[in-house]
Image (tube, rainbow, N blue to C red):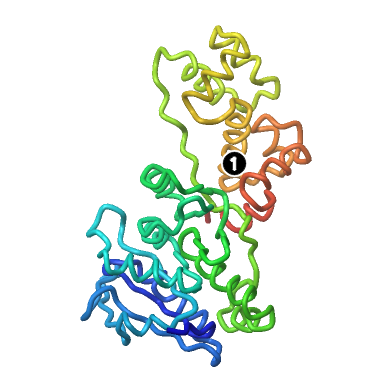
Amino acid sequence: MTRSATTVGVLIGDGAPMLEVAVAPRVFGVAAAFDVRTAGEHPGPLTTTAGIALTAPHDLDDLDTAGVVVVPGWRVPGGAPVAPGILDRLRRAHDEGATVVGLCLGAFVLAEAGLLDGRRATTHWRHLPEFASRFPAVDVVEDVLYVDEGLVVTSAGSAAGLDACLHLLRRDHGPALANAAARALVVAPHRAGGQAQFIERPVPRLRDGDAVGDAMRFALERLDDPTLDVDRLAATAHLSRRTFDRRFREETGSSPLRWLLQQRVLRAQHVLTTTDLDIDAVARACGFTDGVALRPHFRRQVGIPPHSYRAGFRTP
């Protein structure tokens, strides 16, 4: 059966988030050139996390000519399993050259179908650890809005699905159509896939009496001290720098320098949204010499500069 590049199939799962369910039909529906077909995983009304029941207008067989098949979110992992027939349908779509897209938790469905093995992929940041644990063959990327692997695309949570769908429009049908869709939706026409998700990085749970944990606790109490560095942390742990580096990586999966910079940027995010301090003062409160030293680390980790983060995330 021939698949059409302008036919978009949307596969809704029972218990999916309503916002994610609406993303693909809305983005592709603004252009008259597309035939958007929305089908449910089973006949009859489907529940959503908003408590609103939906009835999809198409059958699953209507997706068999779609050149793009989107799984827009899904129920929370650990719920009812995905039916084997759904997984087979996604594999067949991929084998027949369709682009298969998993928005937010839809990435779990693509991974279960085996479509992400050996590929880079992402999902909502809250579920990244479980995603990585369940699907070790997937190269999980945590600091992006979406990942384009050609015939397989995955996105982070909620609004990142808009970015992924607009990216597909731009990639396959040109910037004019993508920009027109963005204007109709009143959203930014392009947020690069490499922009970081706004991930909460909570203070880690530290074990008492553990050398690495004690050093981490020591650091968290002194993040504003510009003399705090990895050598000082190793000395606090009573370990050589080499041994400390090795032990730290074994216990956290990160280098101590990277972890220290992450914690300083995390502290900067908190200070930016809870105080009126200027950027240089924010930087000093987090152990950086000034705003110039803070900015590249902040942008690398968060994806936007400090002043933009403050403007968008300031607590009223």
Q: Badge 1, how many Cα within 10 Å: few under 14, some, many 20+?
A: many
> Is 191 left, or right, of 102 in this rendering?
right
Image height of 131 relative to 246, above or below? below
Q: Which residue is mark 1?
A: 271
Task: Point out residue 163 in the picture as x, y percentages from the top left corner.
Answer: 57, 68
> Is 263 left, or right, of 56 in this rendering?
right
Task: Point out residue 87 in the picture as x, y percentages from the top left corner.
Answer: 33, 65
What's the amino acid at mark 1?
Val
Q: Between 139 and 192, which is closer to the camera in this rendering?
A: 139
Q: Residue at x 33, y 80 (%)?
A: 39
Q: Between 132 and 112, which is closer to the camera in this rendering?
A: 112
> Is 205 left, or right, of 46 in this rendering?
right
Question: Tag count in the figure?
Answer: 1
Task: Point out residue 267 in the picture as x, y percentages from the top left corner.
Answer: 58, 37
| Residue sitting farthest toward the right | 292
Q: Residue at x 35, y 85 (%)?
A: 62
Q: For residue 114, which quarter of the picture?
A: bottom left
Q: Residue at x 24, y 59 (%)?
A: 81
Q: Residue at x 44, y 74 (%)?
A: 69
Image height of 36 relative to 155, above or below? below
Image quarter (top left, top right, bottom left or bottom right) of the N terminus? bottom left
Image height of 292 relative to 37, above or below? above
